[in-house]
Image: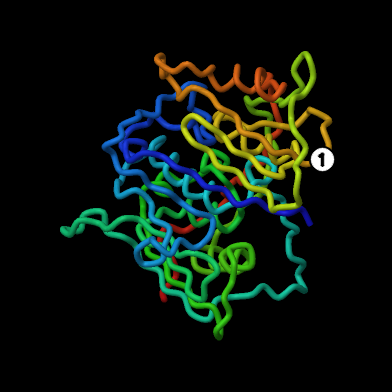
Amino acid sequence: MQEKANVTVMWTATYALTCLNFGLLQRHATHHHALPSDPNLPKTRLHGQFDPHADSAQYKIPPVKPAGPIRRSIYSATLLALFAVMPFVFAQSAAPSAATLQPEFEAVSIHLVDPHAAENPSRSSLSSFPTNLFTMRGVPLTFLIQLAYNIESADYISAMPGWMESQEYHVSAKVEGDQQLTLEQMRPMLQRLLEQRFHLVFHRETKMTAGFELIVAKGGPKLQPSKNNSKPSAQLLSNRLDVGHMNAEHIAGVLAHRAGQPVVDKTGLTGNYDFTLSYAPANDSNSSLPDFFTALQEQLGLKLESQKVPVNFLVIDHVDKIPTEN
């Protein structure tokens, strides 16, 4: 089994209030978004592991209720912090056979969030992992589906009913006994929850969509082989990408988050690499650094070439807005 990577993402609070983001996995995103830099703005940091300094021991999603592209960016950033860096979109998991008994939660409580409630809605949040009690507050069903099936962006869920990105839910699900489960261990249980309570039915399709092929630039690669056997890691900032002990396939997955479109590895490179890629924040004309695409060629000897690439979609056949009773 391939070793998975922990990812850390940092962005300013303005990120949540504008659509000027890193272009995290959005079809509608261009390649050059601005991420305003204001030293007076608080910064939010999401971790792929438990953060002892986070209140309520939860992953916090910015306290705004935007719609459409901005909303998708926020949830994509949260998922980037949680997901292992894998080939783009989501990993194919073997479908359970009829004889396989799918694990279930001991107890589940699901409540619809009333959008017209007088009280000001609290920030959306997600429990940290590992955990014995999965909680998700003020989050749309698309996010739960993304968690359950390891999908990094709602852009790759198709045929969704209109309400799936606007109707929010509070979900609480208790694991049997005292088991502390990771997200990976909990995914089959979340899939079962979606099947039982929301009657989710879907199929998968591979479609050709706009993206990039990662190739070796003229002059050859400038990557340095990893010097140790540490776990794969990546940190994506507005002006820098730090990568440790990653192969080319995983590097392509990380670059996709900054490029704004899926990236397929065509370098033919083997082995694991460490590097720091420094580039100008998007739309920052005062920076002395090159733009992201130029920096990739100059510093790493790699190039992103626009191509139609295969992307795996989860296509909704049926899903209920109102879950079965608790």
- Residue 55, percent from left and from top: 34, 63
Q: Quadrant of residue 195?
A: bottom right
Q: Residue at x 64, y 28 (%)?
A: 209
In the rendered structure, the answer to whether residue 249 lies left or right of residue 289 reads right
Name which residue lies at 46% across and 75% down.
108
Other residues around mark 1 within 10 Å, as few (<14) / some (14–19) / many (≥20)? few
Residue 141 location in percent, x, y? 45, 55
Residue 179 screen position, x and y as percent: 58, 80
Res 306 seen here:
no
| Front one among 269 and 321 | 269
Residue 73 drawn at (x, y percent): 44, 39
* Tally of numbered discs: 1
Looking at the rendered structure, the kind of residue marked 1 is Gly
Q: Residue at x 77, y 67 (%)?
A: 97
Residue at the image point whose x is 47% and y is 16% from the top: 288
For residue 136, what is the image quadrant?
bottom left
Instruction: Indicate whether 6 appears above or below 240.
Output: below
Which of the 4 image quadrants contains residue 19? top left
**SS at circle 1:** loop
- Which residue in the structure is indicated by mark 1? 271
